[in-house]
Amino acid sequence: MKTSLCTFLLSLALLAPAFGQLKIAVVDIDKAIEEYYKTAEARIKIDSWTQQVQETIKNEQDRGMAMLDEIQKLQQKARSTPPDDPQADVMKQEFDQKVRAVKSHSEGLEAKKKDLAAKLQKQVSRLNENILLEVCQYVKDYGKEKGFDLVLNQSKTNPGASDVLYAQNATDITAPVVQALNATKSEGKTTPTSN
């Protein structure tokens, strides 16, 4: 993919004199996402969801511990009951029933943990994807509005993931994009504004 992008860019550079000067910009999408106000809001939502999941799991674990306490009390009571006492059989049946209930609860808790973790991951992924799509669309619109022929991702924190390894005479639009994106918070929209 990067090879074909490099070939494309080289072709554009070679053809540029024939078509006039290309206006190229770079943007650090990672930085734009990191500094976008909706990312901070998303982190708050994710923390809240995570806390809810943890509380649900803790409540179920506490319920399981209460069931184990009941079993231990029943076991202690059974030890002090003579084996020929008619209550001994009733206590054994109750003990066996409670052990099955604890085992079932434990298995159910493991399944619930997996289910909650999967749902949480899906919500987090959807939220992150929406932010990425929103930022990318904004960069696209911003690039059009400002008259750029080409806007490339140039990550400064992770150059290996960048589409650009070197750019001469390219305008870095990361800061104005972040500023404009964050200005949309008070405006309630996510479209470029003149800067």
Image: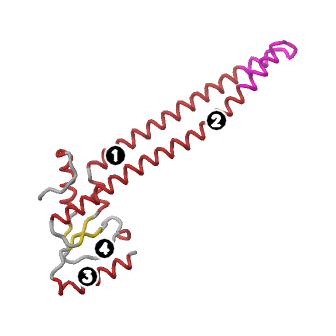
Say which label, 1 or 3, has the lower sequence index: 3
Query: Does the magenta-highlighted stretch encompass residue 150?
Result: no
Residue furthest top in the image: 86
Report crowding for label 3: few under 14, some 14 to 19, many 20 or more residues within 10 A (C-alpha).
some
Residue in view at x 18 percent, y 70 percent = 148
Image spot of residue 107 (x, y percent): 64, 38
Q: Which residue is mark 3?
A: 12
Which residues fall within the magenta stretch?
Answer: 74-97
Residue furthest right in the image: 84
Q: Secondary structure at mark 1?
A: helix
Image spot of residue 161 (x, y percent): 37, 68
Say which label, 3 or 2, has the lower sequence index: 3
Amino acid type, label 1: Ala
Q: Secondary structure at mark 3?
A: helix
Camera-nearest label, 3 or 2 = 3
CA–CA distance in space, label 2 to label 4: 51 Å
When asked about the image quadrant of residue 99, the answer is top right
Q: Which residue is mark 2?
A: 106
| Majority secondary structure in the magenta region | helix
